Amino acid sequence: MSKPTDLVQGTLDMLILKILALQPLNGWAISQRLKQISSDVLGVSDGSLYPALHKLEHRGWIRAQWKSSENNRRAKFYSLTPVGRKQLAEETANWNRVSAAISGIVQLKEA
Amino acid sequence: MKIEQWIYSLPLRWHSFFHPREVEQEIKEELCAHLEQQINQNIAKGMSDEEARRSAMRSMAGLAQIEQRCSDARGGSVVQDFVQDLRYSFRQLRRSPGFSALAILCLILGIGANAAVFSWVEGILFRPYPLVAHQERLFAVAGMVEGKRIDGLSWPDFLDLRRNCTLCQDAFVTTIRGSTLNIGDHAEVTTGSIVSANYFDAIGVRPILGRGFEAGEDVGNDSHPVVVISYDMWRNRFKGDPEIIGKTQRLNNVPHTIIGVAPEGFFGTFIGRAMQFWVPASMEETFDGGGYKLEDRSARWIESYVRLKPGITRAQAQQQISTIAARLQKTYPATNRGRGISIWPLWQTPFNHARTMGPTLEVMVVVVAFVLLIACANVGNLLLVRSFVRRHEMSVRLALGASRRRLLRQLLTEGLILAALGTAGGFLMAFWCRGLLVMLLPKGKSMYLPGALDGRVMAMSVGLCLLVTLVIGLIPALQTRHLDVAGPLKAESGGLVGRSRSRIRSGLVVLQVCLSFILLVGAALLLESLQRIRSTSPGFSTTRVAVTGVSLVAAGYDAPRAKAFQNELIDRLNRVPGIESVAFAATTPLGYICCSSSPIAVDGYQPSPDEQPEVEYNQVGPGYLATLGIPLLSGREFARSDDENAPLVAIVNRTMMMRYWRGQDPIGRRLQVKNRSLRVVGVAADSKYESMAETPQPFFYVPLQQDFVIEPDLNIRTTQSLQSTLATVLREVHALDPNLPLYEMITLQEQVNRATSSSLVAVTLVSTLGGLALLLAAVGLYGVMSYSVAQSTRELGLRMALGADARSLLRLVISRGLRLTTGGVILGAIAALALTRLLGQLLYNVSPRDPLVFGAALVTMAVITVSACLLPAWRASRTDPARVLRD
């Protein structure tokens, strides 16, 4: 149904943190940004976005505030906490290491 | 999580926990806002309203599940879920009160029985002595004759042991003795201990008033008349007198100075009895009579304990003690040849009630474990039935987005509630059952019952509760594993019994039948054994013979005075109409203290090199055999003329004649006893001496007047009732000396009953629990059968429509039940063959594999099975084919 692929499962948290590192956003805006940035390749469904947001909030990496949005409706805006920023740095470093290693392997020429 | 994370996380959890509704609302609002924006965007892209809505909803497929996952992601909900589960479970359990009551009752019985038995085991076998320090390092010390028979220790042997045992931290003596307590002008019999001077220091108990004994107070003959009294005695007899220290109390008519009061809750170190006083070993003769024994290596009157140093094992200590005993054998061959010393853990103490209760309790532990298992299987089965009924509910919850983990948690919560209620009830039951233990002990005053429901018992019960929760929660969970969301929703009505479910259910029934068959066999074996013990003739008549004693030692009688008194009393009683005969004897058969024993030598009997023939004997007055109704096979009884001036004589029993004279007539032959030469004048039939379960033993009698005891037991053969006999004896005794108290008067039948009471209790307990288990198993079987009948109404109706009559349906259902039982019985029989050996010590003249018993158990099981199946089978035979097929 709304289960993201395994690759995304592992990295969805990092993507969200990265997006929020730029500016506080509400859920819908985050989903738009995800689609925009990844040009729909990752296929993050909206269904898995919200549980992920709540999980991150509960881990203390992001925090939420209810504010009125542009059309004067209450919306929940998420922003990165200092702990979240550290976590993002860690995960990014980790990601770079792993993806470098993997691409190194993938680019090996077959003999 | 890291601490910084908690700073953000904690307030959130707090919020989710206390305002769950608000949080839920917020999640809804957030998701709605998202949908709305999506719809707006879709419209902006040019979709129609309807299309925009549908597309937005598609992108958020399973809205309810997303909500659930969001709230699952908010970890603070663990407690909240639990509370919710708890409420829900309570509602579920209240909805089916019959089921809940039955399940809880099963668990109460299972857990309660376990808690009670555990408290007994702990209180009697492992930590039997309240207030005594480090009981795990205490070991009982006993003398061993030729490596098999258990005997006491002599004081000199004890001193040598204490001096030389470097692995022992302490060694102390505590020998139980009765005493007459003189209060004002009357006397009363009470129980106390003769102890070594280090007693209170060694066990780590400090008197609350005064002091314990000092070194040296256990040396000499009657040289230190001091006594420490129990808290109970101080409170009741002395009204808690704060000035008690230094006052005197007459014990056995000897004034003793009270030097201390033991703390409350200290009962001494003898399982099953509360000691009332403690006196030093130097006062031994006052309580025992029969001469000064502290320097006599052949007088084995001591019961003692050692406390091992920390880290020393029983085997190490035993090795050292055996070396000491071997040295004693070499140094003192006359008294110590063939004698070893052994140490025993407290639960195997050879000289108190641990010995009689230990084997019973061991069996009880196994039995209650079985009962608990059966109860769990039963509750599991009940839950399975219910889980089928609730299949629909479960599927709906799954479909609505509950995770399987959440469902499992729900089932475990229900299990927990049942188990917790069962444990609470079981604990209450155990509390009431503590008193049952009294029955294990011979009746008498100053009983003390170990078996407190302390922290350890509590911890064990809670452990059991958790275990039970897991078991009964997981049984139905095993089955929701196979639950798929769509299945039950599609097929509304039952009839499709999952294979795995019926396999679990059948497995549980087989387990129950198996376990209850084992218990049934065990109970039947014990019952058979008790029957044999009770129907075995003790070799003396039990109904018309009463036994009592006159407290002569306490009244200060010396041997000549006692002798004169005894003869005169016999003469007086013999003149009373209704009394057929009377005789004194040093000991009464089957009593706590059995007979003396002595090395013997017989002309013409050559003992093997390491054998020292030793035979037990009793000192009896004229007419003793006739009074007790022990047949005289040949020769004559003792007469008044067999006194200290006459030639020494003896009567031997049949077994002794067969062993030492090889069956030839021993009359007129010589018997060497303790270096004295006796002439055999008679042969008596065998009878029971120490216990009803013993095999025939060699035994002999000597005249009381030639081996005098100041305070023998008085046996009376009478046609009168016990009451009037007591009155008669009291009248005649007081005619001779108005100050003499009489001991309790009982019939020999009562003596036999007391001696067999522990087997009676074992049988009662095991058969009660066995019956209980059987009942539980029957309920389980009934449940399975009626359930499967209910499930297969369609099949049964079809059979009927095709011409099967009610009888054949009845047979069909019953044979299904029997098939389940057969499996259980076969497994049970195999296990029982292996397990009943554990009963070994409790069985008398019954083989643990007695085919008759196994047969009887089989028949009982079959009857129970058939009756459990009867009602469901009858219901099946009443199936209306037309209705079933129409439905």
Image: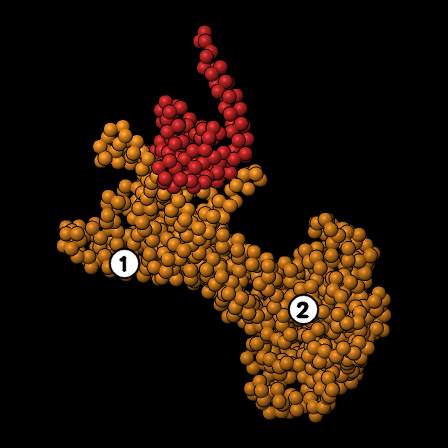
The chain drawn in red is: A
Residue at image point 75% right, 72% down: B261
Residue type beneath disc 1: Pro
Which residue occupies the foreground of this view, B881 or B700? B881
Which residue occupies the foreground of this view, B340 or B604? B340
**Viewer-side label of 1, 2:** 2
Judged left or right of residue B792, residue B575 is right
Colour setting? by chain
Residue type beneath disc 2: Gly
Q: Is residue B336 above or below residue A37?
A: below
User: Can residue B47 be seen from the camera position used here?
Assistant: yes
Residue at image point 66% right, 59% down: B346
The chain drawn in orange is: B
Where residue B428 appears, as percent x and y from the top left, is 50, 65
The chain containing the residue under callout 1 comes to B
Residue B265's disc is 2
Judged left or right of residue B40, residue B178 is right
The local secondary structure at tag 1 comes to helix
Q: Circle 1 sits on which residue?
A: B872
